[in-house]
Image (spheres, rainbow, N blue to C red):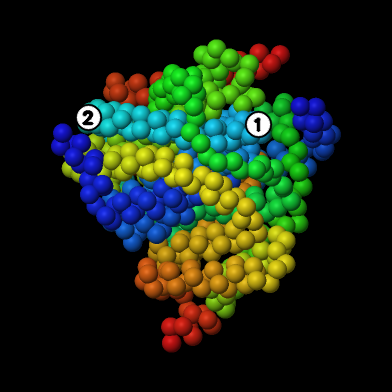
Amino acid sequence: MDNLLLMLAPLFSSKLLLVLFFGTLFGLILGVLPGLGPTTGGALILPFTMTLDPLSAIVLLTSIYCAGTYGGAITAVLINTPGTPAAAATCLDGYPLAQKGEAGRALGMATVSSTVGGIFSVIILVFFAPILAQLAYEFGQPEYFALAIFGLTMLASIGEGSPIKNLIAGAFGILISTVGKDFMTSIDRFTFGINELTEGIGFIPVVVGLFAMSEMLTQSTLINQIFNRIALKAIKLPTKDDYKKTWKTILRSSGIGSFIGVLPAEGGTVASLIGYSEAKRFSKNPEEFGKGSIEGIAGAEAANNAATGGAMVPTLALGIPGSATTAVILTGLIIHGVRPGPDLFREQPDFLYGIFGAMLIANILFFIFGFFGAKIFARITLVPNKILWPMIFAVSVCGTYSLNQSIIDVWIMLFFGVLGFFMRRYGFSVVPVIIGLILGELVEGTLRQSLVIFDGNWLMFFTRPIALTFFILSLIALAFPLIRSRKLKRNND
Amino acid sequence: MSNVRKQKRANKGLPFFFKDEFKVSFVIIFVSAILLITTFTFDIVPPILNRGIQPATFPKALLVLIIVMTILIYYLATKNPWKVEKKLPRSFFLTLSSFVIFVVVSKTLDFFLAISALSIFVSYCWGEKRLFYLLLVGIIFPIIVFIFFETILGLRFPPGIITNIYYN
């Protein structure tokens, strides 16, 4: 009961409500803009959160996360361009339905299923995060090391890229985390005599560079691309028949999305694809999929929004990000001096339940905005890139500079922007770099402290049951993508 | 699908050093090797103070791992070549050069002048020829951003020919 009251706290704080309102609106706009989305948006807004108190800052980031994930569906339905990668599966049926003149019905179903999926996942978060946090009390340094390794090996199956490329990117991210003074011995590493690097490379320049600046360079290669835009019709609620047809799909996809979200390094994109394919598998009319099936939209949208709450479970309970956007949220927690993990549940329940409550309200808010504002938000896609991106550049540069008032940070951001562009061009996802950067300190710190505990004996890791379990899971996680790709290859042959 | 096959075939015909997989692998291994050599210059902690492993050991292990995995992706690419990427358009190189212009102008003249210069340059190169919109992205918007950061967030920007006028 106390926890429920704590969850409702944002409703009684005008400041938090304002932050929620702004975050949801901003998240929706970002979701609508192809190439931006909640991850880049979160990265862009991160420097501004420094002026807020920790709770307001994280509420802002989580509301952007929830609304941005839904916002991607608007452009997926209207112009066949997913605003976020997680909305890619929504295009498959959303756009064909819109072309039939039923854009309103498609958007209405996307809104309802996203809201149900989002709320379902918050409930999962409220119940499962504390359980996971309780379990984390059993963890010592070796267990945390094994867990961090497990989190990193899950990178192998992130997105659709090559598992080895993802692991290289993840290792590179960890390498970045070693720049600066060594935390145990204060010896400089990779500073090359530059004083500003002794403190290490900050999260924000890397995050903004890899997401926003690399996207700007990507957009520079697409300036002649023309999107087909369809006439917008009034947004209307789906019919009762639509709900009868889809309620099972929505619930199933909500469960699938929440579960996939909990897995470290998985996220909305994987969730929506699985949610969509399961909707097709269970459907009485699988032949309609790809031609404008209302079940297809419900399956994909419920799953990708359900992944938001799921991904917050390991982020808050263990400090292991469940997705790219939660990696940015985790960055936000760290720069505000909040250390995620089991102690957070014991020491700051008001903070945590405030976040849960804010996510719940954000889902309700984007439901309202979705119905009344989708048509307006869709107009934002009409802002030409040649005007939009120079503006984003100005905000990115000032935001990055503002954190430490250091021009070096701005140059680091530009460097990572160029690097991120070439990484994406040659099939290296940038998300593992961020996850590696975040987990790097944990991996190295826990490894070195464990070795002190074990008196340098590496084999002692295998005498700890929890650590051993995570090592076995890591091996499975590494083997799974290889088995999957071989199976796919065999099927294709 | 046939396009992909054609692209793959085209990629197979190139000498190995022109292929993307070679160039990318070479760059990763070259940079990693330099960083690996750098790790040998890190100070060594005397045994009496050292607890666990030396500060250079962890980065060394990571770099060796990156090199091994890169060799592995190159080996796999020889069996299954990457698709040939389209040539980068002129607008990309102009945008990239605008980053260089930004760094030079922000270092020598003024931070906000650099933002304005980049915004106008990028917008123009991406096809915007209307004066009002160029002024909007190059002057009006940066002024709004400046006011927001300077007055609302209380940030002080680095000195320069324009910011000095404002601060003085």
Q: Amino acid under label 2?
A: Gln
In this rendering, is residue A196 above or below A89?
below
Q: Left or right: where does residue A240 sit relative to residue B1?
A: left
- Location of mark 1 (residue): A100
Instruction: Where is residue A1? Give x, y as percent.
Output: 16, 33
**Residue at left offset 52%, top offset 57%:** A413
Q: Quadrant of the N terminus of chain B?
A: top right
Residue A9: quadrant of the picture: top left
Q: Left or right: where does residue A369 sit relative to residue B88?
A: left
**Residue at left offset 46%, top offset 41%:** A371
**Residue at left offset 70%, top offset 52%:** A223
Q: Is residue A77 visible?
A: yes
Q: Secondary structure at mark 1?
A: helix
- Chain for numbered disc 1: A
Q: Nearer the viewer, residue A275 or B6?
A: A275
In this rendering, is residue A400 above or below A130?
below
Instruction: Where is residue A203? Give x, y as percent.
Output: 43, 52
Q: Is residue A419 visible?
A: no
